[in-house]
Image (cartoon, coloured by chain):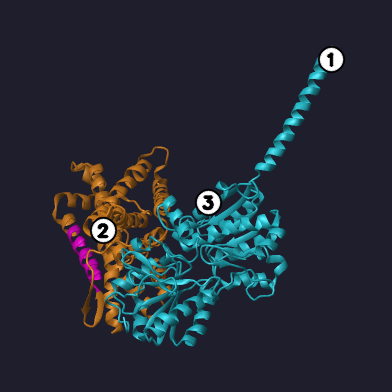
Amino acid sequence: MLKRPNLSIRHALLSGAAALASLFAVAQAEAADPIKIAVIAEAQAIAGASIPRAAQLAADEINAKGGVDGRQIQIISYDNKSSATDSVRAFQRAVSDDKVNAVIASYISEVVLALEPWAARLKTVMITPGAASNEITKAIHNDYEKNKYTFHGYLTSAELAQSVCDGAKDILVNDRKMKTAVIFSEDAAWTTPLDVGYKECLPKIGLQVLDHIRMSPDTTDFTPIFNKIEGEKPDVMITGISHIGVQPTVQWKNQQVPIPMLGIASQATNSTFWKDTNGAADGVLFQSVSGPSVAMTSKSVPFADAFNKKYGNFPSYAGYTAYDEVYYIADAIKRAGSTDSDKLVAALEKTDWEGTIGRIQFFGKEDQFTHGLKYGKGLITGMISQWQDGKQVAVWPPEIANGKIRFPSFIKAQNQ
Amino acid sequence: MLALQILVDGFAISALYALGATGFTLIFGVSGVLNLSHGALMVLGAVAAWAATNELHAGAYLAALFGIGSTLIAAFATYFVVVRPLQTSRAIPKEETEIFVLTGTLLWGIMIQELIAYFFTDNAKTVLPIVEGVVDIFGVRTPQNEIFTAVICWVVIGVLWLIVNKTRSGKAVLAASMNPRGVTLLGFELSRIYIAIWAIYGVLAGIAGVLLGMFLGVSSYSAGPLTGSAFSIVVLGGLGSVSGSLVAAYVVGYLETVTAYMINPAYRFIPALLLLVAVMYVRPQGLFGRR
């Protein structure tokens, strides 16, 4: 019944070996510990589908070059089905279960605004690739210590309005001597500050605002709306649409409404828009931050081509921003030497990154739009494109334009 | 001028509603099924037509036929996969069959809707119009497509009427809606009649879906409201009454159009729903309801 001496020696040897092995395992795990970035996006919406794909492309490229200080980037995707509640659940899961280091979330303002308090509570960095509401940066400015984890990785509605006005000034007023406009936007969180911006900047460039139409995003029949607008005889319709796009455009063409459209039309930035509208998109002028075969920066075209090669279509605007975000998050982690959220925030604030949409820098604590992207020459200016014969043609600014503006025959535009 | 605009616009949309509602009420009248996947089947037809143009590069006519054919197949699938097994199941008590079928078709509709969103995104799609251009009707600039829509809807309804009232098989279907047992006594195969009615339904819903796709466009999100709209019209007109649905479709179509033009496009669906509530209080069997 006495324990044989060999057994205890064996026990000691075995436990020793086990201890060594686990030490090795821990060391291995730490070295291979990936940087996890959650991507919460509307995978079934055309604009949203590009977000996880572009993020994955960026991660693959960075990993192929050795990752960040030897650590690989892992993208964990969540489809939020365009729902704010699903997004919140995804965010909670991403942080508590999947233990992500940062979150890239959504192109819908209502979703981002719902997630902002959660980024604060769970002290996790969140960057949006596409929402526009001014409220996002306003919350950060008003309560910096709490909300500093959120970064607005896209132009604010105020900047979008300015971008449209800058383009409209050259295209509509200087070139075509237009005098009047009607604002045509969907009733959503992001258009409230957009329309305020429009009402302010349009008269400054010489366009009198005759009317301001806000439509329910559930509208399917735009005939009464177009009728009303036509009755007011404006020279142009300045748009603020994202949730809707295909139906008003098709009906605009079918009804042959003789007034051109220019402005923010998110769906028009998607490469599938021509097909979705069966070509009714011809002549639609839209603002974007980049476009296929437009060399906004040296990285724009290589990214768009790589995305097209891998996925069979060009990315939506939110794809460009999501791609840049993975890169500058990796860059910030490298500069901070850590994935600790507070250190990451400090590093992100110092971002000076050449992305695919321009030069990326964030406003600081003292600026009005804290953690928003800086807009202007040398940074991000945006561009205006027009759909012509199935292609997105860049028409403004002149430095990157690769075509002239052309309207369909039913448009009565002066100096066509 | 505005009145004329409302008149023209309202006519086309009402005709579309009429076609959709006719199919819906036929299925209920003959086989007792409230098919809550109705909207999804219409959307499926429109999206299939869109896909035919864009993925298979088919012309407008071929795409439309493809769309109608797709809805027809889906209608058969609805019958054979969802409705019939539930109706013939021994595990379900007789009194509860209708609820099960209702729920079954509802879930089936959601499945179709989600599949469409999965494969084609939830973005709106439009079908290549067969007829393009505009025409002037007493000063109202009307897309020719709208006129085409109204004409086709009424032609189809007319053909349906001819089939049901003048052909032998059509009359059998009508008889089956009144008295299924009586029809079997006369030597007709009830199962054949059901297949015939689902075929007719598939074609009607397919045409309605494709036309809607050409006129306004659809998305996977449209499925629910389309079913709701057909349901309200059919209840308003009287479940099982085809002429009732036709009248109700025009009442609802014009109510919506007047609201959209004169009050606010955002509120267009409200008056019809209010009317439905009122009718439920005052005359629950609907305008022309039989039972």
- Across and down, in percent, residue B129 comes to 26, 64
The answer to whether residue B201 is seen in the rendering is no
Residue B146 covered by magenta stretch: yes
State the image coordinates of residue B183 (x, y, percent, origin top left): 21, 46
Q: Is residue B137 left or right of residue A306?
A: left
Q: Amino acid at mark 3?
A: Gln
The circle drawn on residue B207 is 2
Name the side, left or right, on which A126 lies relative to A144.
Answer: left
Q: CA distance from mark 1 to mark 3?
A: 57 Å
Quadrant where the N terminus of chain A is found in the figure = top right
Could you tell me residue A150's position as x and y percent?
64, 64
Instruction: Kindly report which numbered mark, 1 or 3, lies closer to the viewer in this rendering.
Output: 3
Pointer 1: what residue?
Answer: A5
Please, what is the three-letter code of the amino acid marked with disc 1?
A: Pro
Mark 2 or 3: in front is 3
Residue drawn 41% across the image and 85% down it = A173
Task: Tell me the element at label 1.
Answer: helix
Magenta stretch?
B143-160
Relative to the observer, which residue lies in front, B230 or B99? B230
> Is A178 situated above or below A132?
below
According to the picture, the residue beneath numbered tag 3 turns out to be: A56
At horizontal 51% and vertical 65% (from top left) the residue drawn is A357
- Mark 2: give few (<14), some (14-19) or many (20+) Cα within 10 Å: many
Is residue B184 something that shows in the picture? Answer: yes
Specify the principal SS of the magenta part.
helix
